[in-house]
Image (spheres, rainbow, N blue to C red):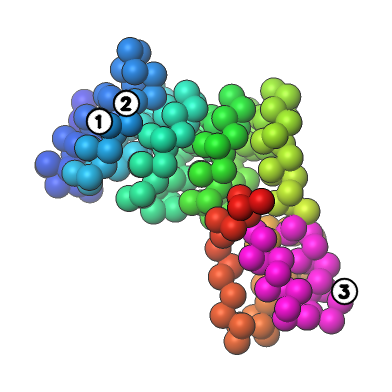
Amino acid sequence: MRSQFATYDSRRCTRCAQLYDECSNKSHKGGRPTEVERLVKLRANGSGYRDPEMKGSFALFIAAWHGKDECVELMLSNMTKWDVAAQKTDGWTALSAAARNGHLKCVKLLIGHMYRSHIEMKTCEGKTAYEWAKERGHTQCVDLFSKLQKLDKELWNEMLYCSQRPTEVERLVKLGANGSGYKRPNVRLLPRLASLLSLRLPLSFPFSLFSS
């Protein structure tokens, strides 16, 4: 059952399985922060074990589904962005789960640890996390996703139509704009951003978005 751990050493495999068991326990519904913290300190990974009987479900997904933001934050501390973007066999990610159930703090935490392309991942129903939040009427989550889209479009317009002002580009990037976040057919923005590399701007998603 636990053969999914081929890439992990045996002790780490056990910790990942224990972390999943902790989060999937019906009595805990997403995990107890103290126990999750203990396992994370032992290098347990929130997507390290996939339950074959639950469509490849994993600990981070369950914690996000139940809105256990403290447990989600603890697990994120030792996960890569690719780990956070893990998908179940039906395409669901931890972000999709949090957005679908309207857990705003979990959504903020997860977005801050994901590449923009991963935020746009779709479930088997063909819906992104933003679309799930919108369908379920979670307005705060919808507003957050909309804010990201607006910033991306502003950056795109700045680079394509305006004078490519370094100060304005820096401002937008610090607010959360991403150079590959807004796309138009046959138009590529990243080559234009390359001309501003001397600014050494961080193109990954910054946490400063959530400071306001």
Q: Which amino acid lies under the numbered mark 2 shown in the image of this protein?
A: Arg
Q: With 11 as the anchor, is 197 left or right in this view?
A: right
* Spatial separation of the CA atoms under disc 1 and disc 2: 5 Å
Q: Is residue 161 above or below residue 126?
A: below
User: Does residue 91 appear in this view?
Assistant: no
Q: Which mark is residue 161?
A: 3
- Above or below: residue 155 compared with residue 35: below
Marks 1 and 2 close (CB-CB < 8 Å):
yes
Taking the spot 26% from the left edge, 42% from the top edge, the residue there is: 40
Q: Which residues are magenta?
A: 151-176
Residue 23 lies, in percent from the top left, at 33, 25
Which residue is tagged 2? 32
- Closest to the camera, between mark 3 and mark 2, is 2
Q: Secondary structure at mark 2?
A: loop
Instruction: Tell whether label 3 touches label 1 (CB within 8 Å).
Output: no
**Which residue is depicted at the point 22% across and 45% down?**
41
Residue 22 in the figure: left or right of residue 107: left
Residue 151 image offset from top left, x and y in percent: 74, 58
Pick out the residue farthest to the front. Answer: 212
Let me know if residue 173 is in the magenta part.
yes
Q: Which residue is mark 1?
A: 35
Q: Residue furthest right?
A: 161
Residue drawn at point x = 72 percent, y = 73 percent: 169
Bin the neighbour count of mark 2 within 10 Å (Cα to Cα): few under 14, some 14-19, many 20 and up: some
Query: Which residue is painted at 60% across and 87% down in the image?
Result: 198
Which residue type does callout 1 highlight?
Glu
